[in-house]
Image (tube, rainbow, N blue to C red):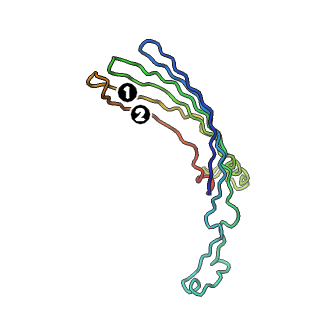
C-alpha cells in the first residue's frame, strides 16, 4: 500500500517590456509518503522437487528458505525545490519564441538514510558496494525552447511546438525493495 500527500507553495511573476514577456517562478513541494512494500511478506518455501511440493513437506536446511518476513514499512517523505526563468519573445507579429531554464532539486526520501545501517557490509575499493545515505542530485538544470506561429496571420489558427528536459522524484518503489 502507498499513500502520498503533497503540499505545495509556489509563486510566479511576469514582466512585459516591448516584444519580451519575462517570467520567473519558484516552487516548494513536500511529500508525506508512507508505504508498505515487502515481496513475499509471508515468507517463501523452495522445494527440492515436485514430490515435496505435492506432499506439502516442509523444506529443511539447504532446501528451504524464509525470505522477506517482517515489516515492509517505508517512509518516503521528501522535499523538492524548483525555479524557472523564461522569455517569450515576439519576434514578429506572427511568430513567438519561448526560451527558458528550469532548475529542479528533489531531496532523498527519509528512509533512504536507513541504508547507512548496512555500512558494516561495505566492501572498500569495490565499486557499487558502499552502504550510506544516498546524496540528492543537485545538477538538474533543464532548458525550455518553444515557438508559436500563426501561418495565416488571422489569429484563428496556430502551429506550436516545444522541447524541455524535466527531472522526477525517486519513485517510491526503488528504495523500498
Mark number, residue 163: 2
Label drawn at residue 147: 1
154 over 5 or under it: above or below: above
Q: Are marks 1 and 2 in contact (CB under 8 Å)?
A: no
Is residue 108 left or right of 162 when viewed as pictured? right
Closer to the observer: label 1 or label 2? 1
Residue 38: % across, % down: 63, 62
When the figure is inspected, residue 60 is found, relative to residue 118, above or below; the finding is below
* Between 22 and 63, the one nearer to me in the picture: 22
Tell me the tag on residue 55: none
Residue 105 is situated, as x and y percent measured from the top left of the image, at 60, 35
Q: Secondary structure at mark 2?
A: strand
Asked where in the image residue 55 lies, by quadrant, the reply is bottom right
In the image, is 156 to the left or to the right of 20? left
Location of the N terminus (image quadrant): bottom right
Q: Tell me where residue 53 sits by quadrant.
A: bottom right
> Is 58 in front, or is 86?
86
Which residue reaches farthest top? 18
* Separation (CA) of disc 1 from disc 2: 9 Å
Q: Name the secondary structure under disc 1.
A: strand
Compare residues 91 and 155 and report the one nearer the observer.
155
Q: Position of residue 44 (x, y in %)?
A: 62, 72
Pointer 1 or 2: first along the chain: 1
Asked if residue 60 lies left or right of residue 153, the reply is right
134, 129: nearer the viewer? 134
Name above or below for residue 139 compared with residue 38.
Answer: above
Q: Residues within 10 Å of mark 2 (few under 14, many from 20)?
A: few
Q: Is residue 124 visible?
A: no
Amino acid at each position: 500500500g502507498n499513500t502520498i500527500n503533497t503540499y505545495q507553495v509556489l509563486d510566479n511573476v511576469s514582466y512585459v517590456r516591448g516584444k519580451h514577456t519575462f517570467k520567473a517562478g519558484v516552487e516548494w513541494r513536500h511529500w508525506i509518503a508512507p508505504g508498505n512494500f515487502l515481496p513475499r511478506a509471508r515468507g517463501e518455501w523452495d522445494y527440492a522437487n515436485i514430490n515435496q511440493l505435492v506432499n506439502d513437506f516442509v523444506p529443511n536446511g539447504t532446501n528451504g528458505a524464509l525470505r522477506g518476513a517482517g515489516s515492509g514499512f517505508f517512509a518516503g517523505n521528501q522535499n523538492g525545490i524548483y525555479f524557472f526563468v523564461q522569455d517569450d519573445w515576439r519576434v514578429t507579429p506572427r511568430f513567438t519564441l519561448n526560451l527558458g531554464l528550469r532548475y529542479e532539486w528533489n531531496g532523498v526520501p527519509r528512509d533512504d538514510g536507513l541504508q547507512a545501517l548496512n555500512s558494516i557490509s561495505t566492501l572498500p575499493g569495490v565499486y557499487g558496494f558502499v552502504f550510506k545515505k544516498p546524496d540528492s542530485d543537485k545538477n538538474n538544470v533543464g532548458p525550455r525552447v518553444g515557438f508559436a506561429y500563426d501561418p495565416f496571420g488571422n489569429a484563428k489558427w496556430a502551429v506550436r511546438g516545444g522541447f524541455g528536459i524535466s527531472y522526477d522524484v525517486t519513485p517510491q518503489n526503488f528504495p523500498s525493495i
